[in-house]
Image (spheres, rainbow, N blue to C red):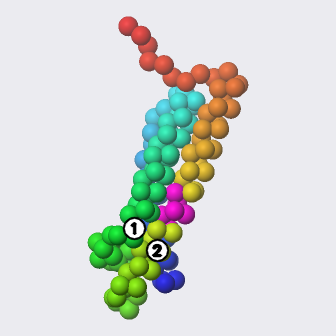
Amino acid sequence: MNEIRRVAVECIGRAVMFGSLAIGCVMIGFSFNPVSAFRSGAFLTLTMALALMWKAMTAGIKNPKHTEVWLYLDEKSRPVDGAARRVFGTVLSDVYKLYARIALGVAVGFFLVSLALMLFGLEGYMPPSK
């Protein structure tokens, strides 16, 4: 079980890292307006947290052979019977929930930074009207 958790943390963490990289690129795109940058980062990170929660809820019903974690496990660590498959789904669900909690904390932090910048007088970006 520890081997499954270790591999799951690596695989899911890598996916979250790439999502965070994309969110960071969007925030850099809004760097001309810090309020909009942090607001967009908060919204996108919250969306990622929701996606991770969805994956956590559906991890138990997914066939382990259709996961990236399965590919990285050696033969002796792969689940073979029904009980081992349930443990596999539970471990994946726990790891998804861990990363979802982290993403939710980051999203709240981005929202708070956005609000603090607004309290200091900065405004969010508004496209010019025609």
Going by the picture, which residue comes out furthest to the bottom?
A: 76
Q: Which residue is mark 1?
A: 59
Main SS of residues in magenta:
helix
Q: Is residue 56 left or right of residue 112?
A: left
How crowded pointer 1 is (Cα within 10 Å; few <14, some 14-19, many 20+) is rated as many
Q: Is residue 86 magenta?
A: no
Residue 116 image offset from top left, x and y in percent: 68, 32
Query: What residue sits 45% from the left and 46% below the top?
Result: 47
* Numbered tag placed on residue 10 in the rendering: none
Q: Which residue is mark 2?
A: 90
Asked if 54 appears above or below 109 in the picture, the reply is below
Residue type at the position of mark 1: Ala
Query: What residue sits 53% from the left and 30% below the top?
Result: 36
Q: Is residue 74 left or right of residue 104?
A: left
Going by the picture, which residue comes out furthest to the right?
A: 120
Residue 83 image offset from top left, x and y in percent: 40, 85
- Image quadrant holding the C terminus, namely top left
The residue closer to the viewer here, 116 or 32, is: 116
Tags 2 and 1 touching, CB below 8 Å: yes
**To which quarter of the image does residue 69 belong?**
bottom left
Residue 124 image offset from top left, x and y in percent: 55, 24
Query: What residue sits 61% from the left and 44% below the top?
Result: 108
The residue closer to the viewer here, 124 or 4, is: 4
State which region is magenta. Answer: 95-100
Query: What residue sits 58% from the left and 30% below the top?
Result: 35
Whether residue 36 is visible, yes or no, is: yes
Real-space Cα separation, disc 2 to disc 1, in angstroms: 7 Å
